Image (spheres, helix red, strand yellow):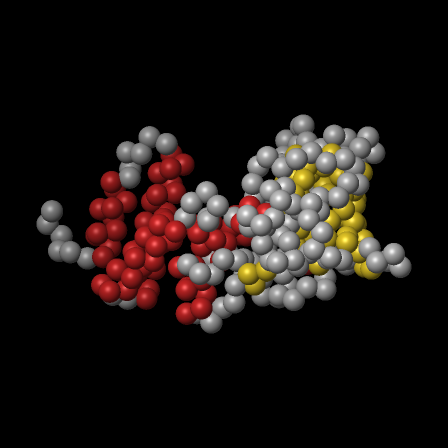
Amino acid sequence: MTEPFSPALLLQQVLDTFEATPDPRLREIMQAAVRHLHAFAREVGLETDERRAGVQFLTAVGQISDEVRQECEMLSDTLGLSSLVETSSTPDGATLRTLTGPFYAPGSPPREYGASMVERDDGDPPAVISGRITGAGGAPIAGATLDVWQNASNRLYAIQDPEQPRFNLRGIYRSGADGRYELRTIKPVSYTIPDDGPVGKMLESTGRHPWRAAHVHFLVQADGFLPLTTEIFDADSDYLDSDAVFGVAPELILDFSRGEDGVHRTTFDIMLRAA
Ligand SMILES: [Fe+2]
């Protein structure tokens, strides 16, 4: 080594160590990550104690995480990374993909067409969500599964809240021969993402709030089509302009209009892209 030290030389040395990575995609990702990380540190003039604070922050994010408390996922969500990756991977002509978030749990029970997924009556305004699932050309998709999950009006999902029945506001519905589906639930309610950990501290110290606009999550799957994870938002909700995880897109904001029978109804048509 004859050249005197420079940041550029250091960067090149690090990049070179990844040159022999057998998987070319992993090589591309690691080298780009290192380039951006070095550029970030140089841009802000990152100091020793600041780098150390960053390491402590990431350590805390890892330490509080478990299967239910997905702090790493929340960090990705609150930095807009999840939303960027999901929306960018939406196939042409399909319904917009959004982040899954930290509260999806597999294993929800199957429910009949039009059945309610409310397993504990908290006196909340009832809502019916219905629509058609089609391919890009408009042909109905029969037998698609819609895995749906939503928080209760105490702001918690059933997987976070031992007081709720395990499958409250969770269910797997199927589209009929005409591609139609229908489910009964409650009008969605805003909630705060868990903010008692390091991500919450990050939000607080940067003057941000932890609220999500009121929404319902969907994971839609059908044979021969790409799976779709998305959300719908209540047009009445607060925080549509400042969702803590950047999940809101105008095309996913729907009116949950209240009928004379007191039931709020909305229509959400879903377009899948062939695999
Ligand atoms: Fe959610």
Question: Which residue ends up furthest to the top in the rendered image?
Answer: 223
5 left or right of 209 in image: left
Q: Is residue 58 visible?
A: no
10 left or right of 153 in image: left
14 left or right of 187 in image: left
Q: Nearer the viewer, residue 41 or 12?
A: 41
Question: Which residue ends up furthest to the front in the rendered image?
Answer: 163
Q: In percent of the image, x 48 and y 45: which residue is there?
A: 68
User: Percent position (x, y) of residue 201?
Assistant: 41, 64
Q: Is residue 106 visible?
A: yes
Residue 24 picture quarter: top left
Question: Which residue ends up furthest to the bottom in the rendered image?
Answer: 207
User: Percent position (x, y) of residue 159?
Assistant: 55, 46
Q: From what the image shows, is residue 8 above or below residue 27?
A: below
User: Which quarter of the rendered picture does the C terminus lie within?
Assistant: top right
Q: In percent of the image, x 77 and y 40: which residue is there?
A: 115
Q: In percent of the image, x 77 and y 52: which residue is there?
A: 127
Residue 39 picture quarter: bottom left
Q: In percent of the image, x 60 and y 42: which residue is there?
A: 166
User: Percent position (x, y) of residue 51?
Assistant: 27, 60
User: Percent position (x, y) of residue 256?
Assistant: 77, 57
Q: Nearer the viewer, residue 182 or 158?
A: 158
Question: Which residue ends up furthest to the left in the rendered image?
Answer: 2
Q: Nearer the viewer, residue 59 or 83?
A: 59
Q: Nearer the viewer, residue 33 or 192?
A: 192
182 left or right of 93 in image: right
